[in-house]
Image (cartoon, rainbow, N blue to C red):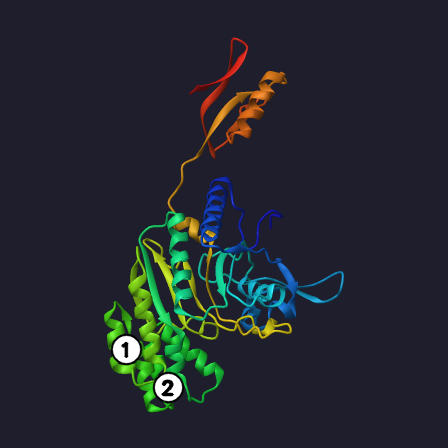
Amino acid sequence: MSAWLLPDHIADVLPSEARHIEELRRDLLDTARGYGYELVIPPLIEHLESLLTGTGEALGLQTFKLVDQLSGRSLGLRADTTPQVARIDAHLLGRQGLTRLCYCGPVLHTRPERPHATREPLQFGAEIYGHAGREADLEILALALDCLRAAQVGGLSVDLGDARIVRALLAGVMAPSQRLAEVHAALVIKDASALDRLTRDFPAAARQGLLALVGLYGGAEVLDEADRVLGSHSGVAPALANLRWLAARLTGARTSFDLADGRGWGYYTGARFAVYADGVGDAVLRGGRYDGVGAVFGHKLDRERPAVGFSLDLKQLVRAAASRPLRAAIRAPWNDAPGLQAAVAALRQRGETVVCQLPGQDSQIDEFHCDRELIEVAGQWVIQSL
């Protein structure tokens, strides 16, 4: 085996894609800043017990583990940034009021999350801590859509659901955690036969409600049907009303509902959403409400704070985003004449890209479009169009 071959699902990012990813990263961070979100940069590596505390425990199988050569303690390479941001909000910032935070950095997965996915996503996300109202849900959804528009991703469709619906149907059901996990998995893939088998000994009302959920996906009529067949279950009606409220206020994207989608059922506590783009099979962005995520990081103060947010993988997003034009550049000869060096420096200070042709070798570049040239005319260095 060649020494320079990379591990499975790990790849170099070459100039064209790297340029596009970096431009997207800057646009997304600028969009979040426009909403008042503060940037944080958590470490890539932490003590394992901290990294996998609370909701992070579900990430145990996805986390690379190693031993710290300085302390001998077990360390982990983060597989998701949200638990770290929750730790920052709860333990380091300790604010009482509303906090808006955003981040962008690599995470590592022991296994790809889906076929052909990278094990080294570049995760961007934004989160609101300290507000339990649906207004925060709406803001995070609006920011998510604006981020995708800034990335020039078209044909957006928002799929809405609410974790409280399945939770209400399962209230009072006594079943092993493994069986409940299988129920949620069957709901996600709409496997009615598996759901029928798994719920045979459930209370009749819970069983009937769960089987009805399999068909509750589609347009706004889904909410009316859910009101009819599930409205008697405590907690379902408020969740449906919340979904109607959110959908009525979303603009610039198609809206659908999937009341059976229980992905993240041990994590989300309220409204959840996935955003799809035309021509892309999987969701380009996922998010929702996960109240209490920072409680395990509390320090002296009660940190059972409400939270809502979203995240996406920039390496996946770049495949859905529109291509961008090359940056215009100026081609210049190389010599050590003070006049030329001063002219090049002045252009770069103005924000221009100047590519110098080193002696005896033409520059080979794919990511800049040299549409002008710096030439000497009567002892002065001037720009000429090519």
Of 211 and 256, nearer the camera is: 256
Q: Residue at x 47, y 40 (%)?
A: 16
Which residue is outermost to the front? 97
| Alpha-carbon span between mark 2 and mark 1 | 19 Å
364 left or right, relative to 148: right
Q: Residues within 10 Å of mark 2 (few under 14, many from 20)?
A: many
Give the residue at mark 1.
226
Which quadrant of the figure has residue 168? bottom left
Q: How crowded is mark 1: few (under 14 residues within 10 Å), some or many (20 or more)?
A: many
Which quadrant of the figure has residue 348? top right
User: Count of labels shown?
Assistant: 2
Answer whether residue 360 is visible to the viewer in this image.
no
Q: Which residue is drawn at 56% across and 21% down?
A: 343
Amino acid carrying mark 1 in the image: Ala
Answer whether residue 109 is visible to the viewer in this image.
yes
Amino acid carrying mark 2 in the image: Thr
19 left or right, relative to 60: left
Q: Report helix, strand or loop for mark 2.
A: loop
Q: Which residue is drawn at 51% across and 42% down?
A: 14
Horizontal and vertical percent position of residue 198: 39, 84
Give the residue at mark 2.
199
Which quadrant of the figure has residue 245? bottom left
